[in-house]
Amino acid sequence: MKLSDWPSLRLVIPFAGGLILSDTIENTRAEMPVWCLVSFALILAVLMLIYSDRKPRFAGLCLSLSFMAAGMAALRGQMQRVKVDWPDRYAIYHGMLTSYPLERERTYRLDVTLEDSLYRGSNIYLYLPKDSSAAALEPGQIIVFDGKINKPSSEGAGFDYESYLLSHGISGTLRVQAKDWHISQTDVRGNLRTSSVRLRRSIIRKYAEWGLEGHALAVASAVSLGEKRALSDELREVYSTSGVSHVLAVSGLHVGIMCWFLYLLFPGFVFRRMEWLRQMLVMGILWAYAYAIGFPVSITRSLIMFSIVAVCKAAGRENSALNSLGVAALVMLAVNPSALFDMSFQLSYSAVLFIVVLTPLLLDLYMPKFPPLRYVWRVTALSLSAQIGTAPLIMYHFSGFSTYVLVANLFVVPVMFVVVALSMSLWVTGWVPLLRGLTVAALTWIIGLLNTFLDFMASLPYARIELTMHHGWSIIIFYMVVIQLFLWVRQKRTRHLVNALACIAFASVLALFQNFVV
């Protein structure tokens, strides 16, 4: 088992390293000193040159350094586009709405893309007072507003809000009064982003017309369309405390269900020697679905991986899941370099990476012969792998960990499969009154049962424990320890265990040093 077996990982790792190094130099997010990262990179390069006795290793080193430099340049270029020097005075701006108003406690928040020639293409958050005019706004409308746009700031936010906005392409924020804005163009302009937002809203309205309401409507909208605005704070807390918030995201589960339906719709014996046409039809429908729900990170990653598998299958070639995952990460980071620092990107890729790597190892260690126990162990192994992969990120972002997540997943995973399948089948059965009534009734009952179960799990003693990782370097060391332990179990070599212990010792020394400095 060598890194050379997965060429895409050998490219995406230095590219991500370049993003982290560039971010450190910009002093926007990382806590490690610049000299520490630079020194580590130089020492690593010198050691590779000293112990390299073959030219291919030197060529590989040069390629890795090139991708690291490309990552640094990509993030720097994106930050230069996002960071805008707004004028220190009031001015009049024209902007196109790219989302429906998001209701806050006292205001509506709007995503606005400026249309002015000087700042054209810059995205800002615009806050309007709560009134009927603001609530009636729709994506694609052009509004005119007057004010002084502020740069992203973390002051009073309680977390690094500035980095969060910059990572999501938001260049500024502005709060205006009712008298300081008006609609310039009532006609709705169409582009890919606004049309997909309106499409999702129209489907949700159709769900409501067909009889879905309350929590059932909120969960069905989240799992089938990626629209989570209807989820109440109480329901979000229940899913978070139970450790199953991930099931509310549109992910590989949806791709798998849709693939199953589409392969039934386009059977192989019909196409026979035209397998490439079958794969193109399936991929086209799946990418159209991703466009309709706004290309969330999890489904985009799944579709890139599926597209690679489909191309290999049509060409009669073998495919590696890790290679597909590496290509998906590289493509997404090349398009949006700051996605590396987005929580959803980190959780999605770390979960899939550890599922692909650790689950087969756990299944090889033990496999029950009794079918019910085999199912329980398969789900447990998959959930355990995902939890190991995401645990440090969850502790870093949420300062806590769900205790009963493995038990909850034994029930939630099969139930959520049914919920997703029924939510998607409603797109077809909704036009037939009898089938629509049965589907809505089944969906409402199952979601109610799921929410009741999760509410019970969240109410158990010690359902959530407070565990925090305060620093980014602790996450990196955690993964290094897990990787070394995995290699030790897989290869039975003592040096991997020694490396894991060395990483733990290094983390302890670094923590002591940091506390001493503080």
Image (spheres, grey):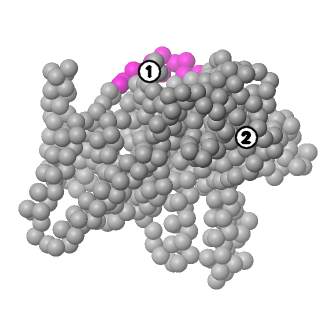
Label 2 crowd (10 A; few <14 / some 14-19 / many >=20): many
Viewer-proximal residue, 111 or 199?
Answer: 111
Three-letter code for the amino acid on which mark 1 is drawn = Glu
Location of residue 331 in the rendering, given as x and y in whole percent from the top left corner: 46, 58
Three-letter code for the amino acid on which mark 2 is drawn = Ile
Residue 386 seen in this snapshot? no
Q: Which mark is residue 142?
A: 2
Label 1 crowd (10 A; few <14 / some 14-19 / many >=20): few
Residue 5 seen in this snapshot? yes
Task: Determine the residue positioned at 64% across, 44% down.
Answer: 115
Viewer-proximal residue, 404 or 75?
Answer: 75
Question: Tags 2 and 1 in contact by the CB under 8 Å rule?
Answer: no
Q: Which residue is mark 1?
A: 155
Q: Quadrant of the C terminus?
A: top left
Q: What span is colored magenta in the figure? A: 455-468
Location of residue 350 in the rendering, given as x and y in whole percent from the top left corner: 41, 45
Q: Residue furthest bottom?
A: 273
Viewer-proximal residue, 67 or 345?
Answer: 67
Which one is earlier in the sequence, the residue at label 2 or at label 1? 2
Task: Determine the residue positioned at 32% across, 36% down.
Answer: 27
